[in-house]
């Protein structure tokens, strides 16, 4: 994609046509390399009026630059304050969101494009900002599925293991039954069934109600399958957003100027 011309608003287009007619009335006085007549003319001197005009222009540009620097510090303060060099995607997305949010405001207020074209540009930017907002928190993709599933099942507990040499691990899924727990350990060859603590050890023992244990285990397996499916759906949603972001950037990124 390359930069392309944009349809201008009627007001701006009229001004452009006026300026264009003025330039068309200028007659060519010299044909050759641009400015070579000035550069090669040793007797050419810059007048005081021209010199003052150039200096005034430099001063105006300097103040204009300072004004934009101050505005940028105010607008970008929060974003820059929270940036960390190790954040990667989160920092990149924050910068993109901040810039596009400011772009929408200025495009809407000062943009020269024809009104319908301007609305299309702004709509594309807002859609991009929404996508970036979702992508900024990858956990949000699974959370929306996870919360619905969790509401349908008991509050499963995990086994917290502390090691003698230090450190802990969290594993398995268990639900209270009678004096113990029904559930399944994690790992390659997990134990499942009814567990109780015997002499400080989490031991697999005979269930006081095997039918209830079997029911709880079946329910746990269904829960696990639904969670696995939720992760796949969340992954698909994430991939869809990435593809849409790529499409929006490809189709619009060179149109986001004025």
Image (cartoon, rainbow, N blue to C red):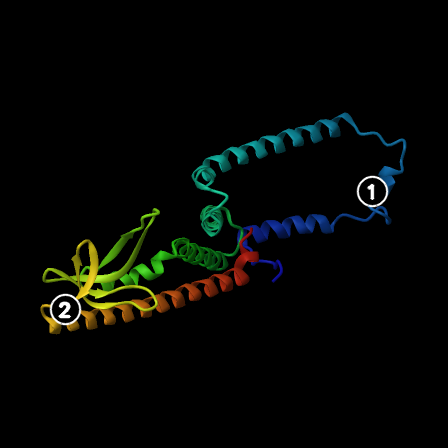
The answer to whether the residue labelled 1 contacts the one labelled 2, judged by CB atoms less than 8 Å apart, is no
Q: In this picture, is 149 found above or below 122?
A: below
The numbered disc on residue 35 is: 1
Q: Position of residue 123 (x, y in %)?
A: 44, 58
Q: Position of residue 86 (x, y in %)?
A: 49, 46
Q: Foreground mark, 1 or 2? A: 2
Q: Is residue 248 above or below residue 133?
A: below
Q: Is residue 29 left or right of residue 206?
A: right
- Relative to the observer, which residue lies in front, 211 or 52? 211
**Where is residue 254 drawn, in percent x and y?**
57, 57
Q: Would you identify the image quadrant in which residue 59 lies? A: top right
Dot label at residue 206:
2
SS of the residue at dot 2? loop
Q: Is residue 8 left or right of residue 199?
A: right
Q: Looking at the picture, tell me which residue is in the foreground, 198 or 46.
A: 198
Q: Earlier in the sequence, mark 1 or mark 2?
A: 1
Looking at the image, can residue 151 be seen? no
**175 horizontally vs 119: left or right:** left
Q: Is residue 88 left or right of residue 169?
A: right
| Residue located at (43% from left, 40% from top) | 82
């Amino acid at each position: 994609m390359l930069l392309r011309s944009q349809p201008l608003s009627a007001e701006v287009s009229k001004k452009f046509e006026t300026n264009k007619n003025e330039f068309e009335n200028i007659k060519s006085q010299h044909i050759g390399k641009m400015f070579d007549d000035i550069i090669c003319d040793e007797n050419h001197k810059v007048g005081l009026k021209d010199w003052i005009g150039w200096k005034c222009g430099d001063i105006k540009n300097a103040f204009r630059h300072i004004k934009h620097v101050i505005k940028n510090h105010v607008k970008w303060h929060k974003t820059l304050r929270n940036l960390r060099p190790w954040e990667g995607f989160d920092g990149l997305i924050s910068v993109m969101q901040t810039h596009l949010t400011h772009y929408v405001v200025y495009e809407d207020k000062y943009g020269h494009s024809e009104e319908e074209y301007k609305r299309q540009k702004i709509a594309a930017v807002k859609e991009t900002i929404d996508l970036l907002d979702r992508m900024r928190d990858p956990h949000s993709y699974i959370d929306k599925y996870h919360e619905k599933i969790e509401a349908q099942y008991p509050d499963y507990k995990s086994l917290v293991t502390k090691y003698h040499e230090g450190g802990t691990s969290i594993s398995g899924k268990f639900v209270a039954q009678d004096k113990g727990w029904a559930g399944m350990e994690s790992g390659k060859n997990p134990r499942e069934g009814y567990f109780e603590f015997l002499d400080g050890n989490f031991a697999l023992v005979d269930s006081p109600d095997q039918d209830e244990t079997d029911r709880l285990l079946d329910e746990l397996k269904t829960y696990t399958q639904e969670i696995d499916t939720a992760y796949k759906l969340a992954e698909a949603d994430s991939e869809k957003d990435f593809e849409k972001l790529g499409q929006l950037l490809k189709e619009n990124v060179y149109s986001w100027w004025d």
